Image: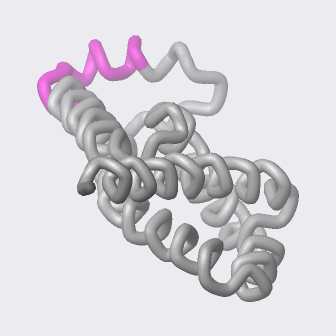
Amino acid sequence: MKKYQKYENDKYANVLLYVIEKAEFKYDNLDKTINELIKEKQEKIKQLQNMSEEEFMHHISNFIFGVASKDYYITIHKRDIEMLKEIKNSINWLLETYNNNRELFNEVIKFNYKGKVKIIKNYISKLANSLNQKVILNYCNRG
């Protein structure tokens, strides 16, 4: 069970990093990026659903360790979509914790993202800077 949990944490961390990177470290780009990734996953599900068994078997033969079940791959994409829907909440929580309680932020990162601590701290820091710059610009433009 621990290996599976580590796998899930690693996958979540990789998705978190990918979303932030694809959003170019700009908070304002997160929603658009997440929506694009969800649409891509939905398209993959449609493609799989529309494949004949023969097409699917040919498609899956391109993978070294393929499980020959369309339902399996459709379920994986559906799980990824659910993960993407939650990722913004996680990012918001990490940003809030990063800005307000750095000690807690560091502990959470160490516990949940072993092996990726430096890179997650770096990405959240860049994202926080983009958000802080926006707040400063909005404040300056008010007056």
Q: Quadrant of residue 70?
A: top left
Residue 124 screen position, x and y as percent? 63, 56
Task: Report x, y in % for residue 79.
Answer: 36, 57
Tell how many labels. 0
Point out the image quarter for the N terminus.
Answer: bottom right
Query: Residue at point 57% right, 22% down?
Result: 63
Tell me, yes or no, whether the highlighted magenta stretch contains residue 50: yes
Q: Is residue 96 above or below residue 35?
A: below
Q: Is residue 53 above or below residue 124?
A: above
Span of residues in magenta: 48-59
Magenta stretch secondary structure, dominant: helix
Q: Nearer the viewer, residue 128 or 119?
A: 128
Along the line of sight, which residue is nearer the eye, 37 or 46?
Answer: 37
In this rendering, the answer to whether 22 lies above or below 126 is above
Give how far across and how far down residue 82 sits, in percent. Answer: 32, 60
Q: Is residue 98 above or below residue 116?
A: below
Q: Which quadrant holds residue 39?
A: top left
Residue drawn at point x = 49 percent, y = 63 percent: 91
Question: Is residue 141 a member of the stretch shown in magenta?
Answer: no
Occupied quadrant, residue 64: top right
Q: Would residue 33 be found to the left or right of residue 35 on screen? A: right
Q: Is residue 59 left or right of residue 115?
A: left
x and y percentages locating residue 31 in the rendered image: 28, 47
Which residue is at a point 50% across and 38% down the rendered structure image? 67
Q: Nearer the viewer, residue 120 or 26?
A: 26
